[in-house]
């Protein structure tokens, strides 16, 4: 899950520059578009997405120290992120409970992530038992009739790649990052490949890089470091391409997916040169443009739309009402339709919505939100756009980065005493949608967007 972009400074800089251009569409030949349509993914994927850091409990030493540490631990130690604890929702110890809940909901696909720091707690030192545990998760999903989708990186880095004294040489940009990433991928992919066909090398690298190097909120917490942001974008894309090549060398029939953060951006006030809008579109697409040719499926996460302007940035997260989530995000299913249309035209490849969900304490609102966004997908498919799947964020209420445990996205929750998975009515509504193969109605705003093609 990404947090909303906090763009006041970025937007102001873009305005002052006045020269940020629309991201140039990468060339896609008719032959490439035809070949993309032949990618075999099977029936429409009805899924749920999660992440290791937000779900997994972890072992500690006798003094209570976790057996591995990430850059996010460093951030929490500094008081710059909510405490996470070691229990979370116990998906490491109680994965069978997750599988049972997934079966009740009836999903066909499940996206989970591997924690790099758990697997390689020290440089070159691998925890083989941890690798076997992740392989076991994939096998259990397959045995339950659920297709595993393995994400190799979801926001967090091993602490040993994070240098607080030299943030420009941390994480993506650490001198050993390329070599250690290559070795890590070569360890885990062959182990997973007999049981996993769908691989997502990275989750929302564009959102993470923007939040880490422009907004100053995530490690290495740099603000308006535009040059470092660009370097990290290139490094992350290079490492994605490394992983894609390794995956295909191990399993040629693998489906390699992107997972990008793609809110829908509208032009806002005080943007006479469209610099703000173009800047936000570059945050959406600059990374994806560098990796799209390596992707069999363009996967992206969609939660909200926003106007690209300093005014909108200053009011982000403060909006309240029926059309906003508890996090202040604008609920806009028509934005999802428009994003599908744009991405489909831009890349000419099959698409999956790899995350979509709403933070709310009103489960009826969650049911409506999911139904309306699924309706947007159905209309896009009717209009000829090649959408192959939809994944809800998320299975359970979990740790939400800067939102801690306050922002509740789950179709269920964990009982803190028994650790049982307690599903909400929205989980069963999603089950009924899966059984029915879709929703009953298309939202009027989506229909209007469809007519304005």
Image (cartoon, grey):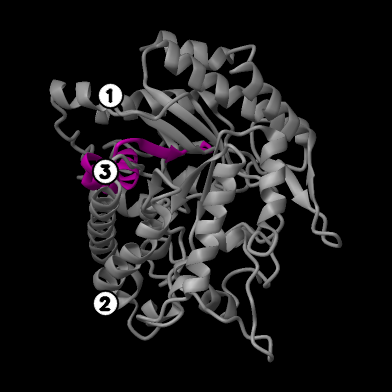
**Mark-to-mark CA distance, 2 and 3:** 28 Å
Question: Disc number at residue 96?
Answer: none
Q: Image point 59% across, 18% down: which residue?
A: 437
Residue 297 position in % (x across, y down) = 34, 35
Q: Is 408 situated left or right of 41 in this image?
A: right
Q: Are marks 3 and 1 in contact (CB under 8 Å)?
A: no
* In front of the other: 185 or 337: 185
In this image, 269 relative to 107: left or right? left
Task: Tell me if I can see residue 414 in this picture.
Answer: yes
Q: Nearer the viewer, mark 2 or mark 3?
A: 3
Q: Which residues are magenta?
A: 277-304
Q: Does residue 282 show up magenta in the picture?
A: yes
Badge 1: residue crowd in 10 Å (few <14, some 14–19, many ≥20): few
Q: Residue at x 69, y 90 (%)?
A: 62
Mark 3 lies on residue? 252
Against 10, is 25 above or below? Answer: above
Q: Nearer the viewer, residue 335 or 440?
A: 440
- Residue 333, picture quadrant: top right
Say which mark, if any, is on residue 38: 1
Q: Compared to 170, does 341 lie above or below?
A: above
Q: Nearer the viewer, mark 3 or mark 1?
A: 3
Q: Which is nearer the N-term, disc 1 or disc 2? A: 1
Q: Is residue 1 visible?
A: no
Q: Quadrant of residue 362?
A: top right
Mark closest to the chain's N terminus, 3 or 1:
1
């Amino acid at each position: 899950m990404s947090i909303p972009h906090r763009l006041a400074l970025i937007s102001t800089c873009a305005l002052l520059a006045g020269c940020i251009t629309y991201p140039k569409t990468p060339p896609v030949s008719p032959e490439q578009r035809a070949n993309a349509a032949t990618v075999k993914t099977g029936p429409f994927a009805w899924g749920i997405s999660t992440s290791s850091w937000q779900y997994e409990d972890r072992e500690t030493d006798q003094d209570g120290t976790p057996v591995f540490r990430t850059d996010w631990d460093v951030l929490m130690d500094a008081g710059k992120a909510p405490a996470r604890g070691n229990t979370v929702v116990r998906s490491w110890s109680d994965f069978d409970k997750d599988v049972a809940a997934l079966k009740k909901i009836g999903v066909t696909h499940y996206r989970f992530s591997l924690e790099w720091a758990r697997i390689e707690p020290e440089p070159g030192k691998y925890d083989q038992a941890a690798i076997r545990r992740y392989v076991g998760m994939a096998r259990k999903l397959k045995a339950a009739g659920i297709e595993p989708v393995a994400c190799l990186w979801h926001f967090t880095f091993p602490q040993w790649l994070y240098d607080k004294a030299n943030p420009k040489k941390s994480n993506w940009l650490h001198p050993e990052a390329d070599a250690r990433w290559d070795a890590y991928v070569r360890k885990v992919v062959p182990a997973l490949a007999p049981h996993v066909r769908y691989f997502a090398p990275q989750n929302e690298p564009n959102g993470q890089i923007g939040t880490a190097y422009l907004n100053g909120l995530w490690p290495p917490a740099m603000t308006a470091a535009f040059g470092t942001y660009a370097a990290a974008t290139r490094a992350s894309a290079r490492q994605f391409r490394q992983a894609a090549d390794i995956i295909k060398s191990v399993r040629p029939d693998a489906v390699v997916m992107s997972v990008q953060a793609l809110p829908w951006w509208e032009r806002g006030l005080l943007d006479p040169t469209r610099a703000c809008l173009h800047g936000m579109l570059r945050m959406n697409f600059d990374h994806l443009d560098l990796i799209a040719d390596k992707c069999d499926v363009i996967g992206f996460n969609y939660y909200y739309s926003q106007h690209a302007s300093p005014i909108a940035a200053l009011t982000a997260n403060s909006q309240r009402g029926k059309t906003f989530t508890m996090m202040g995000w604008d609920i806009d299913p028509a934005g999802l339709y428009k994003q599908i249309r744009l991405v489909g035209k831009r890349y000419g490849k099959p698409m999956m919505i790899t995350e979509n969900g709403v933070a709310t304490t009103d489960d009826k609102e969650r049911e409506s939100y999911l139904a309306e966004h699924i309706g947007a997908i159905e209309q896009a498919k009717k209009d000829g756009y090649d959408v192959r799947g939809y994944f809800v964020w998320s299975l359970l209420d979990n740790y939400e980065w800067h939102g801690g445990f306050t922002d509740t996205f789950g179709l269920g929750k964990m009982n803190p005493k028994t650790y049982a998975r307690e599903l909400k009515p929205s989980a069963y509504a999603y089950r009924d949608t899966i059984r029915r193969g879709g929703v009953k109605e298309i939202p009027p705003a989506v229909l209007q967007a469809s007519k304005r093609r």
